[in-house]
Image (spheres, rainbow, N blue to C red):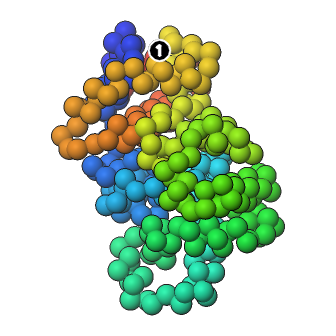
Amino acid sequence: MTTFKNQIFNGYDLLTVLKRHYKIGDSHSWWWPSFRSVKIDRGMEICGALDSEIPDISMCFAGILGQNTKYENAWSALVALYEYLFIQMDCIFQFDSCYIESFKHYEYPNLAFISQTQWQDSLLAILYKTSHDTIAKLIRKAGFHNQKARYIALITKNIVQDFGSFDNFAKKVNKEWLLLQKGIGNESASSILNYALKREEMVVDRYTQKLLISLGYEHKSYEDMQDFLLTNLTAAITLYDFDISLAQVMARLHGKIVEHCKRTKIGKNKEKEELIIY
């Protein structure tokens, strides 16, 4: 058991230490799974989608569903929502089964199929017309389902009205717009920008805060924690033996922080409040 507390002064240092002990999937992995993930294990994306750099609207909804609940609950709710959307789309487009057959190696072939870029606006259009009560029933497992259904309905409506298409939204939206949306705070906005839209945005959450406190860094704001993690982080690209974007580095750092805090129970056990690697 080795303590690295006195060796970490910024995000690059933290990633360097965590990277030795936590493997976050293959070169396509962004840690947070999607329906296009080739392999998922215990909530981690082990083998990422081959087109992992392409924006994915499902991750926008995941950012809302994941609020104040466990990953498993949010994932179950997202699956239920997308199974409903698939049925609605199949009624409209009458999908040829041979196309879906090519997605059979995914956990949810139907959902991986409609997660392709060409279907994103159709998903938005159907969800735009779906009632609040229907959405709430579908996402019940995520908890606070009435509240989250309202948030999903509102952001769907505002994407359509303000941007016209998901592609336009992915290219032009900024954090300020996201923070104006009902139910979207700093963490959800950062998650949407990074995981859904593949932007250079560092996600900060309660795990990040607990870990930084254990290292002796008590930041007063979300932005201060982001600044700490972003310091010298561009240099971290050289830590990988494959081409990787800074946005993906940020996603993988966030993933390693979460996995480390879960494993060591930082904040729950006083004897483990330093950065301890097993």
Q: Nearer the viewer, residue 95 or 34?
A: 95
Left or right for 113, reference 267 = left
Residue for point 32% across, 28% down: 234
- Residue type of the residue flagged with mark 1: Leu
Residue 77 in view: no
Residue 152's x, y, as percent? 70, 57
**Looking at the rendering, which quadrant does residue 123 occupy?**
bottom right
- In the rendered image, residue 18, in percent from the top left (x then y), is placed at 35, 29
Identify which residue is drawn at 37% across, 55% down: 52
Q: Can you tell which quarter of the image residue 14 is in?
A: top left
In the image: residue 183, left or right of residue 102: right
Quadrant containing the C terminus in the rendered view: top left
Residue 83, horizontal then vertical, whole percent: 59, 74
**Residue beneath label 1, please?**
215
Please state which of residues 195 and 138 is positioned toward the viewer in this rendering: 195
Number of marks:
1
Q: Residue at x 57, y 15 (%)?
A: 219
Q: Is residue 117 above or below residue 59?
A: below
Secondary structure under tag 1 reads loop
In terms of depth relative to the viewer, which is nearer, 12 or 73? 12
- In the picture, the quarter occupied by the N terminus is top left
Image point (27%, 26%), residue name: 235
Residue 163 visible to the viewer:
yes
Task: Give the quadrant of residue 259.
Answer: top left
In this view, the residue in front, 146 or 56, is 56
Within 10 Å of disc 1 (Cα), the crowding (few <14, some 14-19, many 20+) is: some
Image x and y of residue 53, in percent:
37, 53
Q: Residue furthest left?
A: 241
